[in-house]
Amino acid sequence: HSALTQPASVSGSPGQSITISCTGASSAIGSYTLVSWYQQHPGKAPKLIIYDVNKRPSGVSDRFSGSKSGNTASLTISGLQADDEADYYCCSSAPSSTLDVLFGGGSKVTVL
Amino acid sequence: QVKLVDSGGGLVKPGGSLRLSCAASGFNFDDYHMSWIRQAPGKGLEWISHLSGSSYYTNYADSVKGRFTVSRDNAKKSLYLQMNSLRAEDTAVYYCVRGKVAFDIWGPGTLVTVSS
């Protein structure tokens, strides 16, 4: 059981937009701006796609965007493409807990 | 090219030990926190430890505290994870990663299997 809750699966058709939520206790996401998101294709290492809630690393498509409201962070993928089919994980710092870093349980994105 | 290459995984019996290594290249290794993150087969990501650039600050997840030790050799641009008293539930792919909360560079991962 993860302290950051994500939907197990999200799906959409090519060209559509989807949003993945990540809800945590207020001591985690609610209080900190260090929320990041990772994309993982099968058999590959995860890749950072969003950091500090809404910043994109160099080279990451602007179809990926992040936001936060209260104790829920969100990742939006616009213009869904076949290659976006992957697992997505949110991550947040949580120094007030026994863990320095928390990961969400992951969301499987399926492109219909 | 910024790169991490983790190694040292393998099959080990319960109660055994293993030492993972991670070789960094293409960046000033001393300037960065480094972390270990693992992923059990078919499961999600679990942060297990991080270490500051100077080795002054470190922390561990409760699941490995007292059994795993992270260290680094900045002269060799290398990160290590000494794993003792291994359990079946430690079976996972272990990733060496750059960063403390935002993990921007990942190694390919090394598989550790704990089984008799």
Image: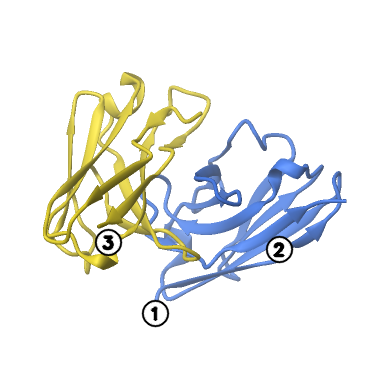
Chain colours: A yellow, B blue
| Quadrant housing the C terminus of chain A | bottom left
**Residue ranking furthest to the top:** A26
Tell which tag, 2 or 1, sits nearer the viewer. 2
- Mark 2 highlights which residue? B9
Q: Position of residue B42 (x, y in %)?
A: 55, 50
Query: Does B9 sit left or right of B49 as displayed?
Result: right
* Residue A9 position in % (x across, y down): 34, 43
Give whichever of discs 2 and 1 has the lower sequence position: 1
Per the model, the C-alpha gap separating discs 2 and 1 is 24 Å
Foreground pick, B69 / A112: A112
Label 3 amino acid? Asp
Q: Which residue is mark 3?
A: A84
Q: Residue at x 71, y 63 (%)?
A: B9
x 37%, y 30%: residue: A5
Q: Secondary structure at mark 1?
A: loop
Identify residue for label 1: B1
